């Protein structure tokens, strides 16, 4: 019952999905993530190479602007695409459009500025885009978390199967864990603090705490029996994450239900 870190939202899918479904989801996400990383550098290289034969008519500055637009568009899709396209665009412009041609040396100061701009542009725009997406994700997560009690209450007021209720409850919980990675450990992990189950709330009802960059662990219990540890950490790039203690507890308890009420003779491994 041990696996590498992964998005907390995928923990539910690892429990209820079949291996075939998980494999198809992984292939789809890999294709979607890889497409801009591959296409961006190709487009940048084609533009730089195709305009090299007419550089005197087009002008190096215009080629630089075209490459900058390609870099900006790639950076809007993700950091990886922005960086790879920026490096490719800078090298392509340097090779085809700066003297001496077909060399990585640069003689003119203004050409140095264009190459440097192309290299930095992808990093800056991709970071700004990532920051904006994180802010939007946090706002969306808070909205969904605020609506969760009413949604779950309405669902529990009627007769529904566990298969219908559980995904709704888990998704509501994971709205606060969307910026976290998690994995399971059979024994108590070393080097990370243990989240207490007994800590109370403050007077205002807030029980949030700061999840450190190295993460923290909480017991997964079936009654008094500890069956494992859930290790939760901020996703790479986040130095820390403020999260509610009750969210972590609820997630761990739902995971305990999944592990405790399966086939007790042949429990399913969770990776």
Image (cartoon, grey):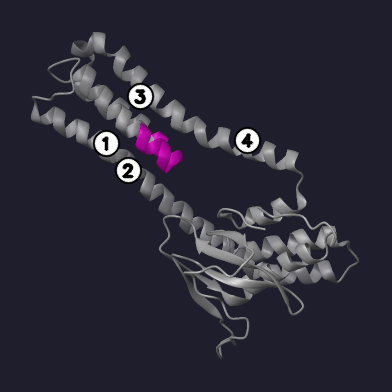
The residue to which callout 3 is attached is: 44
Between residues 47 and 241, which one lies in front from this camera angle? 241
Quick one: label 3 or label 1, which is nearer the N terminus? 3
Dots 2, 1 in contact, CB < 8 A: yes
Q: Main secondary structure of the magenta part?
A: helix
Quick one: label 4 or label 2, which is nearer the N terminus? 4
Judge left or right: residue 28 versus residue 255: left
The residue to which callout 4 is attached is: 28
The residue to which callout 1 is attached is: 119
Q: Secondary structure at mark 1?
A: helix
Residue 244: horizontal and vertical position, in percent?
57, 74
Between residues 162 and 255, which one lies in front from this camera angle? 255
Quick one: label 4 or label 1, which is nearer the N terminus? 4
Q: Which residues are magenta?
A: 73-84
Q: CA distance from mark 4 to mark 3?
A: 25 Å
Quick one: label 2 or label 3, which is nearer the N terminus? 3
Q: Residue at x 49, y 57 (%)?
A: 235
Q: Secondary structure at mark 3?
A: helix
């Amino acid at each position: 019952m041990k696996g590498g870190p992964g998005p907390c939202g995928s923990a539910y899918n690892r429990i209820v999905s079949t291996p075939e479904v998980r494999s198809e989801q992984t292939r789809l996400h890999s294709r979607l993530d890889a497409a801009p990383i591959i296409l961006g550098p190709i487009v940048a290289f084609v533009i730089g190479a195709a305009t090299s034969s007419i550089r005197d008519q087009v002008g190096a500055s215009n080629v630089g602007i075209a490459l900058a637009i390609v870099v900006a568009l790639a950076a809007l899709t993700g950091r990886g695409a922005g960086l790879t396209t920026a490096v490719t665009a800078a090298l392509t412009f340097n090779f085809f459009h700066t003297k001496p041609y077909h060399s990585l040396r640069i003689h003119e100061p203004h050409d140095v500025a264009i190459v440097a701009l192309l290299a930095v542009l992808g990093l800056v725009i991709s970071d700004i885009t990532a920051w904006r997406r994180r802010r939007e994700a946090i706002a969306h997560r808070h909205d969904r978390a605020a609506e969760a009690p009413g949604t779950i209450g309405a669902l529990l007021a009627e007769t529904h199967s566990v298969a219908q209720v559980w995904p709704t409850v888990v998704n509501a919980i994971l709205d606060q864990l969307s910026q976290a990675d998690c994995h399971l450990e059979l024994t108590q992990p070393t080097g990370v603090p243990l989240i207490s189950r007994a800590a109370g709330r403050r007077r205002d009802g807030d029980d949030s705490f700061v999840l450190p960059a190295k993460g923290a662990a909480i017991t997964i219990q079936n009654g008094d029996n500890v069956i494992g540890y859930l290790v939760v950490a901020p996703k790479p790039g986040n130095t820390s994450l403020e999260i509610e203690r009750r969210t972590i507890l609820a997630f761990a308890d739902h995971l305990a239900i999944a592990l405790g009420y399966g086939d007790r003779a042949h429990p399913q491994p969770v990776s």
